[in-house]
Amino acid sequence: MLAAGVAGPTSFRRRRVLLALAIALAALALVGLGGAILSWALGGLGAAPPPRSPFGIGLREGGGSATGLTGWILATQSRFFQNLTDAVRTMKAAGDAGWALIGISFAYGVFHAAGPGHGKAVIAAWIVANENALKRGLAMAFAAAAVQAFVAIAIVSVAAGVLRATAARMTGLTNAVELASFAAVALVGAALTWRKAWRLAGRIAADGVVHAHAPGEPCGPDCGHAHLPGPERAAGSWRAAAGAVLAAGIRPCSGAILVLVFAMAQGLYGAGVASVLAMGLGTALTTGALAALAVFAKGAALRFASVRGQGAEWAMSVLEVLAGAVVLALGLALTFGVASAGAG
């Protein structure tokens, strides 16, 4: 039973839903506008789709035209791939160079992860929106790199090793995986944006609202009160983090695919798998370093918010919504970009 002038659960929930929807749409529009301005400033608005990998498989590396920084990254990746194939040839001819192949593969993974890519953006934005625990941030980074490596091994092993697929079929398969990965990023971003917008809307809707319970009345999820997360919410956050890891890692590295295909053609499948795993380790270390930076930045922001009071706490809530919107906007842009390029 509620006293007169006290907001009931139904009216509070209705107001919260409308506020959350408005917040989510406003955040997505703001991120989209910021991305358009940045693209225009860099001369990329209306440019061609991102260049494909120099390796021939239909996966794109980064974005923008093949000039400037992106062109340098693609050229460096081409040199890495040449060194990798030379190491495989030497290994086949002389029976050694195994450690050289592993070392070059590891270095390629470190470099590849340091360049532009949606996986790092997804992990970093997820941490900004959700995490302040270094252990989980590092676990997500290493898990995403492991997923990326094992997906590359699975694609090549099944398509080339079992099905004897041609290069065209391999390209079609990797394109489908790429599109699915980008769509998954959009779904993760949508869920993250809505959850953070819902939380912020709850704070706004409850601000200044007197909500009372009758004696013995349970406190439901829509009461507007702040509650500590229970075990089921902690488990749910792990499941949600796993979804972000899959979205970030399901798109394999094009260099890993090509090295493994080349190694299989030379009869060195085991060496190719070892090369891919070394790339994954290098990628994990770089992505883990970026994840650690995101965790420390989030921790510093939270400490600042605790000192500055409610104003900084509100700013943190808004930042978390924007981080989710970044993931959503990135996923939508990549999905529609790849789909439109394929249709053309």
Image (tube, helix red, strand yellow):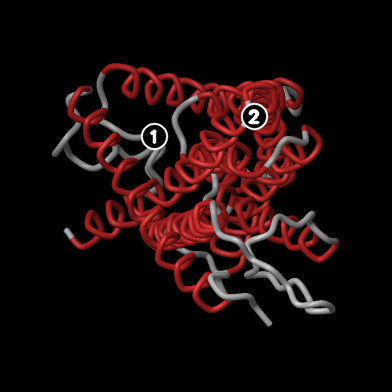
Residue 233 in view of the camera:
yes
Residue 343 lies, in percent from the top left, at 20, 63
Please state which amino acid type lies under the numbered disc 2. Lys
- The residue located at (46%, 73%) in the rendering is 14
Residue 65 in view of the camera:
no
The residue identified by callout 1 is 62
- The relative height of residue 276 versus residue 89 in the rendered view (above or below) is below
The earlier-in-sequence mark between 2 and 1 is 1
Instruction: State left or right for residue 56 relative to residue 180.
Output: left
Q: Residue 138's mark? A: none
- The residue located at (39%, 46%) in the rendering is 330
Instruction: State left or right for residue 91 relative to residue 48.
Output: right
Instruction: State left or right for residue 344 relative to residue 263.
Output: left
State the SS at label 1: loop
Please state which amino acid type lies under the numbered disc 1. Gly
Would you identify the image quadrant in which residue 36 lies? Answer: top left
Residue 64 lies, in percent from the top left, at 27, 31
Q: Nearer the viewer, mark 2 or mark 1?
A: 2
- The relative height of residue 320 versus residue 215 in the rendered view (above or below) is above
Residue at the left extreme of this rendering: 46
Report how far apart the C-alphas of labels 2 and 1 lie in the structure: 26 Å
| Label 2 Cα neighbours within 10 Å, binned few <14 / some 14-19 / many ≥20 | many
Camera-side residue of 7 and 249: 7
The residue identified by callout 2 is 298
- The residue located at (52%, 65%) in the rendering is 164
Camera-side residue of 276 and 127: 127
C-beta proximity under 8 Å, tags 2 and 1: no
Would you identify the image quadrant in which residue 212 lies? Answer: bottom right
Count every numbered label the image shows and give the total. 2
